[in-house]
Image (tube, grey):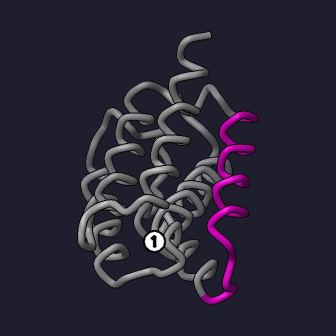
Amino acid sequence: MNLTTQAAVVFYQHLGKLFYAIALADSKIKKEEFEAMRKEISLLSISENVKITDAEIDIEHQITATFKILYFDKATSEDCYEEFIKYKRNNESLFTAEIKKAILKIAGKIAGSFSDVNKSELILLGKLSIEFKEKSDT
């Protein structure tokens, strides 16, 4: 799969929305959540099996910049999660099994980075897991 640079940037911006939604699920974003996201994204960036374009894109920058903008705009977890799901449903072909696995791993690391996963984060992670499985089973 090889997207245009612009389409790939939009993809990574939507991942930023999802990761922001996970971090904010409990109504607070902690530094540890942001740092866990950055660490896991850097691992994602070097993994060939989740690359969606040959274009030179700073994946970490795209995701973290989106995250920061949402934070300063005081976006809600619910709105960001719904925007991600809408994007995902309109672009199912981008979400390969490998990419879904990587997204779930990063989301789980974000949620668990500060005193384990709480109920709000667990619910959102469960919804995401179900969303990814539903389209895989059809």
* Residue depicted at x 32% and y 69%: 38
Task: Give the farthest residue toward the bottom.
Answer: 72
Q: Is 111 contained in the magenta span?
A: no
Left or right: 96 as drawn, with respect to 10 = left
Q: Quadrant of the C terminus?
A: top right
Residue range (magenta): 72-90
Q: Is 80 contained in the magenta span?
A: yes
Label 1 crowd bin: few (<14), some (14–19), many (20+), radius 10 Å: some
* Residue depicted at x 46% and y 47%: 125
Position of residue 107 measured from the top left corner of the image (x, y, whole percent): 39, 53
Return the residue at label 1: 61
Position of residue 70 measured from the top left corner of the image (x, y, whole percent): 63, 78
SS for dot 1: helix
What predominant SS class does the magenta segment belong to? helix
Residue sitting nearer the eye, 20 or 95: 20
- Up the image or down, 49 lies above or below 72; here it is above
Residue sitting nearer the eye, 49 or 75: 75
* Residue depicted at x 44% and y 35%: 100
Task: Give the farthest residue toward the top.
Answer: 138
Residue sitting nearer the eye, 53 or 16: 16
Left or right: 96 as drawn, with respect to 98 = right
- Up the image or down, 44 lies above or below 64; here it is above
* Residue depicted at x 42% and y 25%: 97
Position of residue 102 measured from the top left corner of the image (x, y, whole percent): 35, 41
